[in-house]
Image (tube, grey):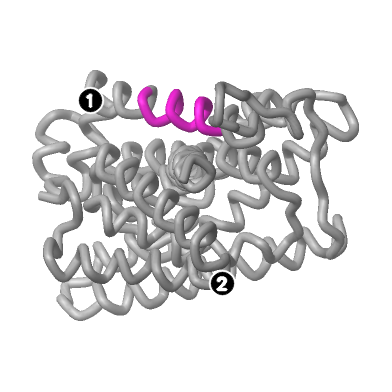
Amino acid sequence: MDASYDLLLNAILSGLLLGGFYAAVSIGVAISFGMLDIVNIAHPAFILLGSYAAFIGNTYFGLDPILAAVIALPFFYALGMAVYQVYYVAFERRDERSLSSAPRNDQSLRGLSFFFGLLFITEVGLVMIFGVDYRLVQASYIGEKYSLGPIQLPYRLLVPFIVSMVTVVGLQLFLSKTFVGRAIQAVAQDQLALRLMAANPVRIKRIAFGLSIATAALGGAILIIIQSVEPSVGREYIGRVFAICVLGGLGSFSGMVIAAMTLGVVETLTSTLFGPSWAPAVSFGVLLITLAVRPSGILGR
């Protein structure tokens, strides 16, 4: 009985730590999809770019993977702003000039095509540069674990969990305590009100999308600490990150964290009790049941 209890306790704690990783890779989608209404299905590609940036910093310069990603954040922020500017010029501005009500659905479809193409191009570029071999990083805490009685917490999950929670709290404070942050939360709801407050909606969206890509890169550094990566591994997370944002409630950081923790615990318990192959099916089953009971998500408005 004691052995079973210890196994269950460690599975739950590992699930919470895994949920921290899921929160880290979902923050960017919570911003782009939940707050800007932009379905960026290329998000996993930017996660992988962050992973390879951490790999380069770690392998060639001896930097800690997290530190390497933090140093690269300004580049990814600028990249995100540039990607949004292209998206705005190609899709949003063109449809703003149209007097027809039809192009909105057309814009969404063309936007999906744009981000799908971006995902494909990024994957091909990574394959051409790095090949298809799995890459990993080295750090003093990888392979070590924290032990407290029956509790065994691997540092390769604990360190990413701490980084993820610091990032979530920092972004939540930025969004709730600053003018730009509050403007980001409002930009998808009432652009006219923003203009009356002397805020440029395009500039606000550009900043928000830059933050989305920067956090994706940080999530990529966390990913390569947890597991080795290759250019197509990001596809595994396309459905999961969107599911977490929908389950938590669009635009709700707190709900996103709760959803990430929930999926992490469910997947770990399922893997422990029934085998890893059941984990995705059970976690998405929880998503469907939750949305059937509460369509707006856990903390959705």
- The residue wearing badge 2 is 277
In the rendered image, residue 182 lying in the magenta stretch gets the answer no
Which of the numbered marks, if any, corresponds to residue 145?
Answer: none
- The residue wearing badge 1 is 176
Residue 239 percent across, percent down from the top left:
45, 66
| In this view, the mark in front (2 or 1) | 2
Q: Residue at x 39, y 64 (%)?
A: 283
In the rendered image, residue 164 lying in the magenta stretch gets the answer yes
Is residue 237 depicted above or below 141 in this figure? below
Q: State how far apart marks 2 and 1 are (Cα).
A: 40 Å
Is residue 251 depicted above or below 173 in this figure? below
Residue 162 percent across, percent down from the top left:
51, 26
Position of residue 16 in the picture relative to residue 63 (left or right): left
Q: Residue at x 46, y 46 (%)?
A: 1
Q: Amino acid at mark 1?
A: Ser
Label 2 packing within 10 angstroms: few (<14), some (14-19), many (20+): few
Residue 108 occupies quadrant: bottom left
Is residue 153 depicted above or below 179 in this figure? below
Q: Residue at x 25, y 44 (%)?
A: 255
Q: Residue at x 59, y 41 (%)?
A: 217
Q: Which residue range is magenta in the image?
A: 160-169
Label 1 packing within 10 angstroms: few (<14), some (14-19), many (20+): some
Is residue 260 at least partly visible in the picture? yes
Q: Secondary structure at mark 2?
A: helix
Position of residue 260 in the picture relative to residue 146 (left or right): left
Q: Amino acid at mark 2?
A: Ser
